[in-house]
Amino acid sequence: MFRIGIDVGGTNTDAVIMGDGKVLTGVKTATTEDVMSGIIESLRMALDNTGIEGDEVSSVMIGTTHFTNAVVERRHLSKTAAVRLCLPAAQCLPPMVDWPDDIREAVGNSYWMAKGGNEFDGREISQIDETELKDIAREIGSKGIGSVALCSVFSPVNDTMEKQAMEIMMTVLPDADFTLSSEIGRLGILERENAAIMNASLRQLSSQAIRAFSDALKKVGLSCPYFITQNDGTLMGTEFVQSYPVLTFASGPTNSMRGASYLTGEMEAIVCDVGGTSTDVGALIKGFPRPASTTVEVGGVRTNFRMPDVFSIALGGGTQIKPGNPVQIGPQSVGYRIFEQGLLFGGDTLTATDVAVGLGIADIGNAEPAKALGEDTLRNYKNKIDEMIVNAVERMRVSPEKIPVLAVGGGSILIPETVGILPVVKPENFAVANAVGAAIGQVSGEVDRIFNLTEMSRDAALENARNEAIEKAIAAGAKADSIEVLDQEDVPLAYLPGNATRIRLKVVGDLDG
Amino acid sequence: MDESLRQVTSEDLEAIEIGAAILGTGGGGNPYIGKLRCRKELRKGRQINIIPLHELSDDAWVVSLGGIGAPVVGVEKIEQGEECLRALYALEEETGHKIDAVISSEIGGANAMEPMLTGAQAGIPVVDGDGMGRAFPEMQMCTWSIYGHKSTPSAMADEKGSIIIIRDTTSEIALERFARATVVEMGAAGAIALAPMRGSFVKRYAIPNTVTQALQLGRSVLESQINNSDPISTILEKEDGQLLMTGKIIDLERHLKGGFAVGHVNVEGFGDFHGKLGEIYLQNEFLVFKLDGEVRACVPDLIIVLEADTGLPITTEMLRYGQRVAILVLPCHDLLRSEEALGVIGPAAFGYPEIIYTPLVRNSSREGN
């Protein structure tokens, strides 16, 4: 049986078919306005190239920027009700307080604060009030809002109140979608609540997208199950995506990094994904992207759910070089129009790719116009380009070890043979590493909670967290015997007597079937 | 003196947020939530008025107040909003004094914002100064306590409406301990207002102009982001500091000891510091810095860790293997360098009796008095 991986980016839609762990074919097509026709096109090409029939495919994995773009462009967002369980605490800063005005309006700026919430040690701030929540639910119903984000103080420690509130409100709003903040984010109520509200506002779009993906697959004769990739390199089933669309944010760079790791066999490395206009640099730890430790803004909204730590620079294959003293490299780029505008394709714009071709580093198009600039000049430009890459890689390096730099993406000919002291590896199929990353997706389970170490030892707390994460992974479809711990971290909490510690732990496993 | 701040605008809050975090020397809690709360007060039409120390009248009553608890709780259980105000009113009732101004006990971190918020709500000014000029882990480490103020009666308030008056304790440390135990009952987040001080005392013992200093530090960072200039050198120039090292974190160890996060960080030098090894020792805040085994800076001078590229401050919770950092030291105020002060906040007081504090020499005359 075969697996198909698809990655829908801003410019290109890439697809690969994999069998026995090998890439059988990789294709690149332009991303279309409606997204789906680009997917159909790439799937047709990939199936035609290999002669593989639809019923020989066991699963399709899709990475998509669909939902990130909706937030960034403020399009297709549904009206959402934000309900925070907190009173009397936390009333001084209402939900969405620090959002840009346009996105707050786009989701309807409707919020309520109600009694509820927990203390850090599990005590109740106040009891949940059934009448109050039913009244709020009726108001939500009368405003015609169909998606609710529920956020309770300290819900990552105790999610009971969010669940209770959902049950109560469902009696009034049986058809509404509910998003619970405890299922999405970490401690830090504003950021977790933001992520929950964004998620709630994407639920309707998510349902539509899932239907459209199903239709697209049917059109090319694929009836197998399909999955969407999350930003930690693991997979979500279609039902799960409908509930948690925000977890797809930034899955593009993640797929590239995971694909680069798979194609080279390197588990600890720096990945440079060079596209037409920019280069994403990230660090791999045990074959997975290192997560960002700070808050990450999406469309101007602060969130704190896990995202890959990616540093982007404005350098790609189509980056314009403006001669002069000093020479100016970017940030403008001709992007995919390089095929008309680049010197090497008969255009009149000197691009980064021209420099590489002129120096004989790559053999595409016509090298002569670039060569006319003279080798010294080209060498000087190339040194500047190399310097940008070295700085970006240095920034992301996480250890003194001499780990390799993995160069992937359509523009990776720009990456020199070595980056500083680090060796560079360019895998076969480098141009479609992102689709490979989608195809090899695994399943994960995660725990992030405060444990009180007066009641149990640190080891017992870690074991507790590990078991809970494993249960979550199995529930998400992982094969039990393939599960391993990917990441574990415990941070002691300052100023609290009694040694409380916050444990974050993640396990991954292979998809069952 | 540079132009001092008179009234805080929304833009000023953005800069003070960054500056206060820098002065937090790794601790003090994140001022982000406090910034949002102050901004909301300004949008309601309230004012944050700042009064320079020298304009304070000698017989004015000034209260030092702020949040108390665990920073990690503060980002999850946000305040009801008037905890500090209730503590202030409780103190007025307890002492019978009408309070004329508020002041921060600790400019470094989240408590830079609390007095501005309370001042706006109560309609009284905020004094341009504070009790630490930086962040320290405990209340008795502020200049009021060091120079003889008796901080009881103190009033504490939580979000639920509880008011606790601590009428008398045998020492400032005892007050810290009672308050710490009380705040745990409050869910590890609450407000505390300390016994009123006379204007004459505050003028003599407050670290002067620190609200303005936080603003200017933050502006240096923000302006360098806009101009693409180097924030580190701008800060060093304006604040009379020294660059201790630029480097990359290559080892990091943190653990819990008596409710505090303690540990150390190793930094491998780059640029001018290539081949050198830096070590930072921390207890909530950065306490000691050594270069190749030799002490180069210690408390009470301000050891500051900034992201090398952006100049944004890195707190002890944010430290991470592989980060590229600039480590700076800024001179602390003379009030923190006296014998009485060093006994409470010098290296020995934090468990480093072998280190003799050598005051960082200032290049220019930016002395306060």
Image: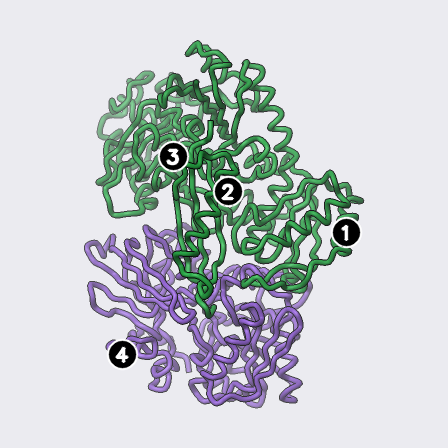
Chain colours: A green, B purple
The nearer-to-camera label among 4 and 2 is 2
Pair 4/1: label in front: 1
User: Sequence order check: which comes first, mark 3 or mark 2?
Assistant: 3
Q: Is residue A287 left or right of residue B88?
A: left
**Image quarter for residue A262?**
top left
Query: Which amino acid lies under the numbered mark 3 shown in the image of this protein?
Result: Met
* Alpha-carbon span between mark 3 and mark 2: 25 Å
| Marks 4 and 2, how far apart at CA | 50 Å
Q: Is A399 above or below relative to B172?
A: above
Q: Which SS class for mark 2?
A: helix
Instruction: Determine which residue is flagged by label 3.
Output: A257
Distance of label 2 from label 1 (alpha carbons): 31 Å
Any part of residue B343 in sight: yes
- The answer as to whether the residues below labels 2 and 1 share one chain is yes
Quadrant where the C terminus of chain B sits is bottom left
Circle 1 sits on which residue? A134
Secondary structure, mark 4, is: loop
Disc 4 to disc 3, C-alpha distance: 49 Å
- Residue B197 in picture, x, y percent from top left: 54, 86
Which numbered disc, 1 or 3, marks the residue that appears first in the sequence?
Answer: 1
Residue picked out by circle 4: B353
In this picture, is B228 found above or below B72?
A: above
Q: Residues within 10 Å of mark 2 (few under 14, many from 20)?
A: some
x%, y% of residue A13? 48, 23
Chain label for disc 2? A
Q: Count numbered badges in the picture.
A: 4
Q: Which residue does the numbered mark 2 point to in the structure image?
A: A472
Left or right: residue B347 versus residue A487 is: left
- Marks 1 and 3: same chain? yes
Q: Is residue A355 above or below residue B11?
A: above
Query: Amino acid type of disc 2?
Result: Lys
